[in-house]
Structure formats: C-alpha cells, structure tokens
Image: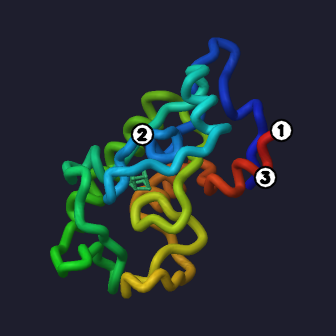
C-alpha cells in the first residue's frame, strides 16, 4: 500500500499518521539519540502526526541495552528477555492509533519494534533478515498501513 498526503489529516485536521518518535527528533533510541527525518519532524510540528515510542511506552529506560528478535523472543545484547515490554508497547501503540483514527504509521526501519519488511537478525552484527518488529506487526494486524521512513520520503509529495 502506498502513502498519500490525504493520509495526514481529515477535514477537522486530526492527525492520522503515527510516527516513530525517534524519527520526529525525540531522543528515545536505545543509545539516547534520535534519527530525525526533516519531513517527519515538520508533520509533527504542524500537528499532523503523532509521535510514539513503543519501547519507552512499554516501560524500557533510555538509554537501554539494544535488543533484537531471535527465535520469536526479543532479547537484549546481554541475553535479557524483554519480549513482555515490547509487546506491552505494541498494545499501547495500537491503542493510540485507534484513539487518533490513525490510517498510516511511518515507523523506523530495521528496529525490533518498528521495523517492517526487514529487521536485524538477532546476532547484533548488523545483518538483516525478512521480518517485522513487534509494534509494526500489531499495527499492520490492526489494519494500519505501515511504511518505513524511506518509503515515506520517497512517496510524500
Ligand atoms: S522503539 Fe521505535 S520509536 Fe522507539 S526508539 Fe526504537 S525505532 Fe524509535
């Protein structure tokens, strides 16, 4: 499914896009940094998109030990199972999406929460495998059009 500018707001200018908070410049990544995309920062500033970080919402601290999906679980680099926190964040993301009438989610690529299409393979070596993050899956299963920030920049006109 593609993205169109009409996904951003309805007649009442309610936000209809959920975005990964790190893409909006919020320093919520595991390393305490953000990965801002100017077009997404602008949408949030204009009130046309809602920033959300499922890992923070699920109760994880920032900064935190990085985690990847392995064997159907989410494990930190030092072997702690954080699946529950990731799933809690996904439930809250789906609830926020429902509350705001979200139709499209622009989520950070490759992340074990937000990635879609491909994610890190669980080896913490930067290798990618086909798959999706926990929140990306929950939103897709809720009927939301999930795209990456790269899709967004390519398609936004
Ligand atoms: S969970 Fe998603 S929003 Fe939060 S830092 Fe990771 S990629 Fe960004």
Percent x, y for residue 96? 40, 35
Up-down relation of residue 123 to residue 146 (above or below)? below
- Asked which secondary structure carries label 2, the reply is loop
Residue 64 appears in which quarter of the rendering? bottom left
Q: Earlier in the sequence, mark 1 or mark 2?
A: 2
- Asked which secondary structure carries label 3, the reply is helix
Determine whether label 1 and label 3 are within 8 Å by CB. no
Q: Residue at x 51, y 64 (%)?
A: 115
Q: Residue at x 44, y 48 (%)?
A: 34
Q: Is residue 96 left or right of residue 102?
A: left
Percent x, y for residue 88? 26, 53
Q: Is mark 2 within 8 Å of ligand 1?
A: yes
Q: Would you name the residue on which mark 1 appears?
A: 157
**Distance (Cα) linking label 1 and label 3:** 8 Å
Q: Residues within 10 Å of mark 2 (few under 14, many from 20)?
A: some
Q: Of residues 22 and 74, which is closer to you in this image?
A: 22
Q: Is mark 1 within 8 Å of ligand 1?
A: no
Q: Residues within 10 Å of mark 1 (few under 14, many from 20)?
A: few
Q: Residues within 10 Å of mark 3 (few under 14, many from 20)?
A: few
Q: Would you name the residue on which mark 3 appears?
A: 154
**Distance (Cα) linking label 3 and label 2:** 22 Å
- Asked which secondary structure carries label 1, the reply is loop
Residue 48 appears in which quarter of the rendering? top right
On residue 26, the disc is 2
Up-down relation of residue 48 to residue 85 (above or below)? above
Q: Return the residue found at the far top.
A: 12
Percent x, y for residue 93? 39, 44
């Amino acid at each position: 499914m593609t993205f169109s500018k009409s996904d951003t707001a309805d007649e009442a200018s309610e936000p209809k896009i959920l975005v990964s908070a790190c893409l909006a410049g919020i320093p919520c990544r595991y390393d305490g940094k953000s990965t801002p995309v100017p077009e997404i920062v602008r949408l949030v500033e204009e009130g046309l998109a809602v920033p959300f970080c499922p890992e923070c919402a699920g109760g994880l601290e920032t900064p935190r030990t990085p985690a990847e999906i392995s064997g159907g679980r989410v494990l930190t680099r030092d072997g702690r199972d954080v699946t529950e926190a990731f799933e809690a964040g996904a439930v809250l993301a789906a609830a926020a999406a429902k509350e705001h009438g979200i139709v499209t989610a622009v989520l950070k690529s490759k992340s074990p929460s937000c990635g879609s299409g491909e994610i890190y393979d669980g080896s913490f070596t930067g290798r990618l495998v086909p798959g999706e993050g926990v929140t990306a899956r929950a939103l897709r299963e809720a009927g939301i059009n999930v795209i990456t920030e790269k899709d967004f920049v390519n398609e936004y006109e």
